[in-house]
Image: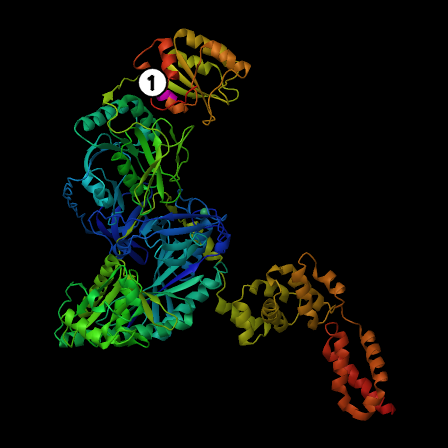
Amino acid sequence: MKVGDRVKIKRGNITHTGIVMPSKGDFIVLKLDNGYNIGIKKDAKTFILEKEKKIVPKKTSAPPINPSLPTVSILSTGGTIASKVDYRTGAVTSQFDVEDILRAIPELGEIANFKGEVIYNILSENMRAEYWQTLARAIAAEIEGGADGVMITHGTDTMGYTAAALSFMLITPVPIVLVGSQRSADRPSSDNAMNAVCATKVATSDIAEVTVVMHATMSDDYCLIHRGTRVRKMHTSRRDAFHSINARPIGKVDYATREIETFVEYKKRGEQKLMIKDHIEPKCSLVKFYPGADPSIVDHYAARYKGLVIEGTGLGHVSTEWVPHIEKAVKKGVHIVMTSQCLGGRICDLVYDTGRDLLEAGVIEGGDMLPETALVKLMWILGRTDDPDEVRTLMRKNIAGEISGL
Amino acid sequence: MGLKAGLEIHQQLDTKRKLFCNCPTELRSTSESTYEMCRHLQIAESELGEIDRAALEEAQVKRRFIYKGYDTTCLVENDESPPLPLNPEALDIALEVALLLDMVPVDEVHTMRKIVIDGSNTAGFQRTAFVASDGKISTDEGIVHIDTLCLEEEAAQKISEDVGGVVYSLDRLGIPLVEIATKADITTPQQARIVAEHLGMILRSTGKVKRGIGTIRQDINISIAEGARVEIKGVQTLGMIGTIIEREVLRQVNLLKIKDELKRRGAKHVKTEIIDVSDVFASTQCSMIKKALKNNAVLAVKLTSFGGLVGREIQPGRQFWDELSDRAKRFVGRVFHTDELPGYGMTNAEITKLKKKVHAAPDDGIIFVAGERSKANLALNAIIQRANEALEGIPEETRKALEDGNSAYMRPLPGAARMYPETDVLPVPISKELVKKIQRSLPELLHERKERYIREYGLNDELAGLIACSERAPLFERIMTLGVSPTLVVRTLTATISELSKDGVPVQLLTEQHFIGVFELISANKMAKEGIPSLLRALATKPSKTASTTVSELGLETLSKEDIEKLIIEIVESKRDFIKERGTDAVKPLMGLIMEQVRGKVDGELVSTVLKEKIAKAMGEV
Ligand SMILES: [Zn+2]
């Protein structure tokens, strides 16, 4: 008996007929003819009625090109923007082909023509700094190839990191939009369709920046356009998980009217020439300070890493015990940046003694940067220079909207 | 005629928490809503590229769903968070019902997602789990097999619907319910009713199901030979089941007659030729069309060979026309057909012009609609589809039960294949031990309980049935240990309570302890039964008090026999002349006079005996 076989199972006086489903553990999982799955103990008597029938899915043809519409390149990293459910087996498969995405979200075809490429097919928690480089290069190639905008489908967990990395690595003449879904794309209620429609609107707009476009509220009413360096996932499951921290979003997209309204200044389409600066130093880390945290944590990183971002308390503090360890690390050549675990607000180490001691020890103040953005920025800077003064200057300088003027 | 019917009963369970979250299973008033959200639903395509026909129809109208939430709903109802594990309390009740129906539970329960895109489930699917199968119940007309028992989430309650969207309330979403489906073994309307009653009795026997309007719903599957399977949803009362089946049989018979008549006329498939007939009504006096014509158009379609059939009655008070126009209702408000004209301010001249414009023969019918072009088009296409189905016979449909026993179109019968696993909920194994434990403590069935009450307490059939089916049956049995009159207790727990409730007394505040306290007083002869209503009224108003303190506050304590005698002697003395004049006829008026003073404190029979005795004595003395 194999998965996919149609079988009859006898349990005492009764029988169940259905298709064998994949299962782990002590039970055979049977999909009954009425659509339900049930688990049956493995010791039941089984008769195979029919061997598995392989059904080859029909391949859909590419939709016709509408010459009056702009072209958007969709690059997939594994974040699911479209799914297919096979109700025969209950299997849900992610869709990456442009044809399949358009079949799942037909509204997209009214906004743009699409090209697509799968760059990665990974869970977003499996992203790595090196993958950001590959992605940045692929985006640059699409832009060089004439794309009017680039849309990246990405798992939401680490979307903020990738958005920040691309913000530093690319100077772009066209919109680069990251999009995903918080609620699985197989469910009719998924936020995928509205997010994709709004993201496509932004990809065809004049907002030539790296942005994240996701639901603004629990309702399917509008999406916010977040700057890639300011955005953070603030909820595990809600549609409106993404927030701009310490900055206003660039704007919003109304789902019903598909109109974009902007709130702040932004780089306009064609304003800058395409440039890629994809250097990165992955040997950087992010540490959260907590009451009683052992200062040898700093020594551990100092021995192995080139840069360290600390999420300090409040205005940017760690315990007095940590200060000499930090001083030693800086002397050794490790670049240490202070951010706040408050997320909201900026670092100011001049207010209290510990802060002043930290500054003397050589800590770089991270301003109002998100800790994650500061980490990505530090990796990016260290990929180019190791000079302490230059690192300090660049960390404090606004490069991609990540830090407010001091 | 070959009637085959099956029942599907949906019964809400009275659990503390919802099926997949910790919210209470409490219904709220929409005025208490604390937040609102709006959503759209999309259909997912199956791997085979087939879209469920019911789902497709829903999706044709891109609808906006508005949900009202409360401080008793959470992110799970909002579809903003994964569900919690399957509520074990609900699963236990489902297993208990399954065992009462002789069903066999599965070894492991898997929760599925069943696609429902009418907006009644925020996720676009209902979570449902197959718990048991292969049960049966016996009726005089034969055995009816119980096919399946599923445990599932209740849907959100629809509040209103208009062009702006559908408004749902989230309070009901997620309340556990069991869905029990019989095989289509039922062959007569009477049998259907008996089966439904029996299932209802078994469910109530658990004492763990919700009661009241809307907590139980019946759906009926009906087909006749040469007819089609039709599911009628939302039958609210058991009494209607027979009528609904009779009316559906009638509908199918009449639709088959229409099919034969169309065949006789040589009717062909209606072509999708929609014609703009706005100019016909350019100077119409029909206000509905006049209004629509300001910005929109009148579109018409010719139903070849349907003339005269459109207005034919298929159920008492429903015409074939209703079958057609039901399909268009979701797109436009009003559709007209030539069988109902002249009327509505339209003239014979206009009708003649209309017939000419669409080249209608005398045998043809014309359907027309005034409104926004795209919607009018959708409406007419839906009608054409239904008209073409009439040539084939009877469409498989899900229909909505109407109050008079007729039914109206809801949507096509959904295909079978629209379920897939709910991967956010782990499967739950059902151990032999759990099944044994539930089997050992199965409740007494209500009809058995009623027989026992007749036997043990000498109650009559009516009162025994009343209390056995009441939620207060366990309280009744506790009170019976006090040695009071069973009839008095039943009347108090049923009639007295409902009278007080009608009077606006908050009887829901009365506790079991209150009732026990009252009957302890009765049992100890510390108060008369006439005082019960006043005492309960006082206790319901001040539920913190006990029966024994309240009885003295109200002065309802029984008078001693001496006190009563003293009182009666006083009255008899003062009415001596009256007694002299009336003789024994004086008993009744004097009785009234005395009872006015002592009602509730004394047994009327005792007063009567003493009074008669004293009057006789007084008369003797004259
Ligand atoms: Zn909840």
Q: Which residue is mark 1?
A: A379
Q: How many marks?
A: 1
Q: Is residue B284 visible?
A: yes
* Image location (x, y in percent) of residue A304: 37, 13
Amino acid type at image mark 1: Met
Vertical relation: A343 (above or below) A357: below
Q: How is the image coloured?
A: rainbow
Residues B495 and B81: in front is B81
Dominant secondary-structure state across the stretch colored magenta? helix
Q: Which residues are magenta?
A: A374-379
Residues A250 and B130: in front is A250
Look at the image and tell me in which quarter the C terminus of chain B lies.
bottom right
Look at the image and tell me in which quarter the N terminus of chain B lies.
bottom left
Asked which quadrant contains residue B410, the reply is bottom left
Vertical relation: B327 (above or below) B583: above
* Image location (x, y in percent) of residue B385: 20, 64
